[in-house]
C-alpha cells in the first residue's frame, strides 16, 4: 500500500493531522491499533483555545451537539473552606469555559469528517510492528499487522502519534529526557446529584488530594497517590480507599460504597518527558510521542491537537507539492511547538514539587495558603490561572 503520509495512532493528534492534511489534497493513511475508540478515563478535557481551533476547522457546531459538559470554574476545598481559584468565564472569545467531552465521541466525529475526503483512510485494528527504511536509513513507511495479515505501507512521511509508549520512537532509537513525578493517579466514578456543586472541585487534605470533575450524572474522580504507591493501597484494601475518599470529600461519604471492586479503579502512571529532537529523516513525532505531560491542568489533548495543527500548516504545502520534507522543514514544527511544551511542563513540574509532593506527605489540618485566599479576595485575579489553563502558551490557528 502506498500513501503520502502515514500517521501512526488514531488519537486526537493523529486524526486532526490526518483531517487537515487530507483537506489540503494530501493522501493520508491513519493506523489505529484498536477496533474502536471506546476506552474509559482517557484525556477528555478540551480547552478554550482548542474549542476556538475546532471552530476554525469547521467543527464547532458538531462539537456543541456532542454530550459534553461545560465547566466555568475551578474550586479548591481545604479544611478551612472552599475557594474558587480559576474563573473561566473571564476568558475572552467564544468559549469562556472548559469542555469535558468523552474522547471516543470526539474521535468518532473527527473520523467521520475525515472519511468524507477521498484521499483519507483510517485503518482500524492495524498495529504497527516496525518501520520501513530506504538505502540511506531514512524512514519510508511502516510494517503493520492488520485484520488480513501483515501489510507494508510506503510513505513519504511517517508521523508518530502513538502516545507516551511510542513504538515508532523506540524503533528510531530516540530516548526522551524524563523528569521526576512524585505522583500517580487513580481514576474512578462516583455518582453526582443535582444538589452537588457544578464545575471542578479539587479536594485537599492531609496525605492526599482529589479532583472531582463534574460530568453531569457522575463525578470523574482523580485520586492522587504517591509515585509507586498503588501496590500498598491495594494491599490496604478497598475499604481503606473508600475511607480516604470520604475524608477528602465528606459530601461524597454516603456514595463511596459505589466503589465495589478494584476493576472500577484505573491506575494512571504519571510520566513527564520530552524528546530533544522530534524528527528523523522521513519521520516526525508529535503529541505524547514527543512529550508526555503531567495530568495537572488536563492539557495533554490540547497540546497534541495544537502540535497537529502546526504540523499540518507548516508541512501541508510541501507534501501537496509532492516533496518529502527535509530535516530543516521538519524541525520547523519542533521549533514552533517546543516553547509551549517546555513552559507548560515547567509549570507542571513546579506544581508537582511545591504543591503536590508536600501535600502527599502532610499531616494534620491543611488550610488554604495566602495566594489562594488572595484569589478569593480579588476575584478578577482568577482570570490569570484561567488564562494559563484555558488558553495556554502560544495557541495555534489554521492560518
Image (cartoon, helix red, strand yellow):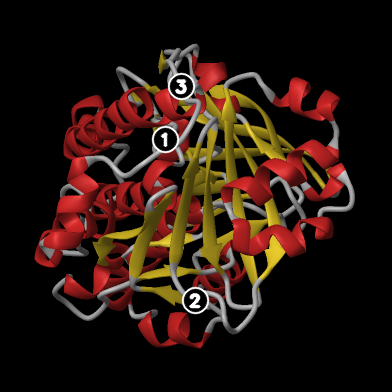
**What residue lies at 34% left-to-right and 80% top-to-bottom?**
58
Provide the residue designation for mark 1.
Answer: 293
The front one of 300 and 125 is 300
**Residue at image coords 49%, 76%:** 69
Task: Compare marks 2 and 1 and give the one earlier in the sequence.
Answer: 2
Name which residue lies at 14% across and 61% down.
377
Indicate whether 96 appears above or below 336: below
Residue 117 numbered tag: none
Left or right: residue 149 compared with residue 107: right
Query: Which residue has dot 3 on it?
Result: 181
Mark 2, residue position:
69
- CB atoms of marks 3 and 2 within 8 Å: no
**In the image: residue 227, left or right of residue 242:** left
Q: Secondary structure at mark 2?
A: strand
Specify few, some or many for label 2: CA neighbours under 10 Å numbering under 14, 14-19, or 20 or more: some
| Element class at badge 1 | loop
Q: Residues within 10 Å of mark 1 (few under 14, many from 20)?
A: many
Q: Is residue 126 above or below residue 141?
A: below
Marked residue nearer the N-terminal end (3 or 2): 2
Circle nearer the N terminus (3, 1)? 3
Frontmost of labels 2 and 1 is 2
Left or right of residue 70, residue 3 in this image: right
Observer-side mark, 3 or 1, equals 3
Amino acid at each position: 500500500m502506498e500513501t503520502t503520509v502515514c500517521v501512526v495512532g488514531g488519537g486526537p493528534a493523529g486524526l486532526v493531522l490526518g483531517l487537515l492534511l487530507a483537506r489540503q489534497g494530501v493522501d493520508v493513511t491513519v493506523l489505529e491499533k484498536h477496533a474502536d475508540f471506546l476506552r474509559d478515563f482517557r484525556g477528555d478535557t478540551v480547552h478554550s483555545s482548542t474549542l476556538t481551533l475546532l471552530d476554525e476547522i469547521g467543527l464547532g457546531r458538531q462539537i456543541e451537539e456532542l454530550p459534553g459538559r461545560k465547566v466555568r470554574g475551578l474550586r479548591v476545598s481545604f479544611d478551612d473552606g472552599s475557594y474558587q481559584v480559576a474563573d473561566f468565564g473571564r476568558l475572552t472569545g467564544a468559549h469562556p469555559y472548559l469542555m469535558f467531552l468523552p474522547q471516543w465521541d470526539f474521535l468518532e466525529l473527527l473520523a467521520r469528517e475525515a472519511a468524507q475526503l477521498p484521499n483519507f483512510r483510517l485503518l482500524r485494528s492495524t498495529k504497527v510492528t516496525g518501520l520501513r527504511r530506504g538505502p540511506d536509513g531514512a524512514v519510508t513507511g511502516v510494517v503493520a499487522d492488520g485484520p488480513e495479515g501483515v501489510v507494508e505501507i510506503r510513505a513519504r512521511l511517517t508521523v508518530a502519534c502513538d502516545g507516551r509508549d511510542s513504538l515508532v520512537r523506540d524503533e528510531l532509537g530516540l530516548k526522551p529526557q524524563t523528569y521526576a513525578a512524585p505522583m500517580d493517579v487513580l481514576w474512578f466514578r462516583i455518582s453526582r446529584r443535582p444538589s452537588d456543586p457544578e464545575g471542578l472541585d479539587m479536594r485537599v487534605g492531609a496525605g492526599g488530594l482529589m479532583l472531582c470533575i463534574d460530568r453531569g450524572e457522575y463525578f470523574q474522580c482523580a485520586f492522587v497517590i504517591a509515585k509507586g504507591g498503588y501496590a500498598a493501597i491495594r494491599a490496604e484494601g478497598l475499604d481503606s480507599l473508600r475511607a480516604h475518599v470520604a475524608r477528602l470529600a465528606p459530601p461524597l461519604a454516603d456514595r463511596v460504597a459505589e466503589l465495589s471492586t478494584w476493576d472500577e479503579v484505573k491506575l494512571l502512571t504519571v510520566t513527564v518527558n520530552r524528546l530533544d529532537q522530534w524528527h528523523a529523516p522521513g519521520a516526525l513525532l508529535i503529541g505524547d510521542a514527543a512529550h508526555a505531560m503531567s495530568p495537572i491542568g488536563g492539557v495533554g489533548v490540547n497540546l497534541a491537537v495544537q502540535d497537529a495543527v502546526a504540523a499540518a500548516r507548516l508541512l501541508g504545502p510541501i507534501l501537496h507539492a509532492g516533496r518529502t520534507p527535509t530535516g530543516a522543514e521538519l524541525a520547523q514544527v519542533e521549533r514552533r511547538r517546543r516553547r509551549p511544551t517546555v513552559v507548560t511542563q515547567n509549570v507542571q513540574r513546579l506544581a508537582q514539587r511545591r504543591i503536590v509532593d508536600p501535600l502527599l506527605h502532610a499531616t494534620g489540618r491543611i488550610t488554604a495558603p495566602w495566594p489562594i485566599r488572595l484569589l478569593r479576595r480579588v476575584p478578577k485575579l482568577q482570570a490569570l490561572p484561567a488564562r494559563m489553563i484555558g488558553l495556554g502558551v502560544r495557541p495555534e490557528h489554521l492560518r
